Amino acid sequence: MSSILGNMVKQFCGDTHNAGLRVNHPLALRVLAALLSKPLLIATGLSGSGKTKLVQAIARWLTPPAVPYDPFFVGASIAADRIVYHVKKSDSLAIEFWNDMDEEKAIKVVLPRELISEWVVYMATLPDPKNIPARSLREAVSSKSKFSPQLHSFETQLKAAGMAVLNSKTAETKLACHAVIPVGADWTGNENIFGYPDGLDAKVYVLKPALELMLHAKSMPDIPHFMILDEMNLSHVERYFSDVLSALESEEIIPLYQGGERKSNELAIPCGIHLPKNLFIIGTVNVDETTYMFSPKVLDRANVIEFRLETQDLEAFLKQPIKPNLARLDGGGAKFGAHFQAATLETQALSFSGNSLFHNELVNFFTALQGHGLEFGYRVAHEAARFAHFYQLLTNPINGDSTWVTSALDCIVFQKFLPKLHGSRAKLGPLLKTLWFLCVNDKAKRGANPLAAADQAARSSDKKGEPSRTVPPDAPYPLSAEKIGRMWRLLLDNGFTSFAEA
């Protein structure tokens, strides 16, 4: 898997260039490693800086544009000559059919897909299989089958299933593996994500795009699905998204309704849903007077990546100012999709080179933050380790090369530690100076006791110890140092600073 994913970032950047989208390799690497480490990502920054375009590009590139149509999706109705069978469960091995929507009345039959395929192969040789009696088909197929005669005795279900496959042979379905969902300022409850039971009809459920995407993800567990919440902070996130935030950690089922089964346009809606393991949630964030800030609860559960536009970026764009054509990316990286999804499910002990440096630095930053009541917990430490693991996997460094470790740590400081910082000069001034010291000084300059040296620098009145507009060229963590420098300037100008810059 490492060799496959090791080529992913390079190919993605090449494909986006051909589509007219400007994506630099370090940013793509950070976003993809962040998604692998945790399925919740917040993209913040200047409006129009390419946040939504980049995450759309990743979603469209990693997922196939279409696949052969499968008539046996959960909730499907399969018509026989005199009865309609309902698909209640479906996976890659078998399908469960009910002959009645009422569970107490229904006769339930589970048939292997391979058995159905035997019927399909035989029925495809006939000029008019629809008008052949099911019993005649059973006698012909079962005589050469590896399955028992007892299974073949469900001939009406098997004939109906075979006809459903034959009728769909030439069909393709457009995959809804990603969706851009605009968040409204009036989103005050989770019904905007999960829909709600119709109050006038006890059999109807009002479906929302987010839940529809979740149900689609559950039906195709090997394909990653992307939910892009555009302008996620236009409303209070906790009001409409608290169930998701909780389920991301607890993995508990999210209840949807009580009572009898409900449907939406013939699609059966379950009474509750687990968040699919192949669902990635990305929120884009603009910061101005119309938006709301995120609480530590949200920030603690996500990677936060900032998008900025530099002078050289604008100059390069103005030389060829064209609108990107994302359709050129559709399915371009689908061969990576299953590997990408499988990697996120890794639960064994994480391993990567440079463990000692990683552990020591994480403890240094924990202790520095702890001195100001802003330390992180086990969740953040675990996600930091996962990020480092996948950062190495995507970087695919040459054996013995550990320079990637400092780059990964730089991203972790920026994405996991700095976003939660906001406050007055009295509160954050000393901490920013401490973090600046750790970010711009290597092991030799820090001395034998880096935390004591950082604390001394924070207490010093020497202007040289203050965060600066200019990051030293040999700074081990330049990305984080540059951000700390910007936060420091806001602190001096306004007496208050935060990670989010309006």
Image (tube, rainbow, N blue to C red):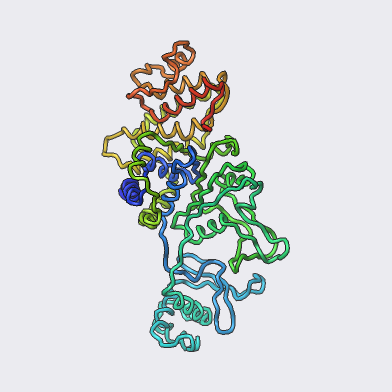
**Percent position of residue 251, x then y:** 56, 48
**Percent position of residue 447, x then y:** 37, 16
Q: Nearer the viewer, residue 296 or 105?
A: 296
Residue that appears at 49% across and 71% down: 71
Residue that appears at 48% across and 65% down: 91
Q: Nearer the viewer, residue 269 or 44?
A: 44
Does 135 sit above or below residue 178? below
Does 356 sit above or below residue 140? above
Asked whether residue 461 appears in the rendered view, the answer is yes
Q: Residue furthest right?
A: 200
Asked whether residue 351 appears in the rendered view, the answer is no
**Percent position of residue 371, x then y:** 53, 21
Residue that appears at 65% across and 62% down: 205
In the image, taking residue 197 as reference, residue 77 lies left or right, namely left
Query: Disc count in the image?
Result: 0
**In the picture, residue 30 is in which quadrant?**
top left
**Percent position of residue 129, x then y:** 45, 86
Q: Residue furthest top?
A: 461
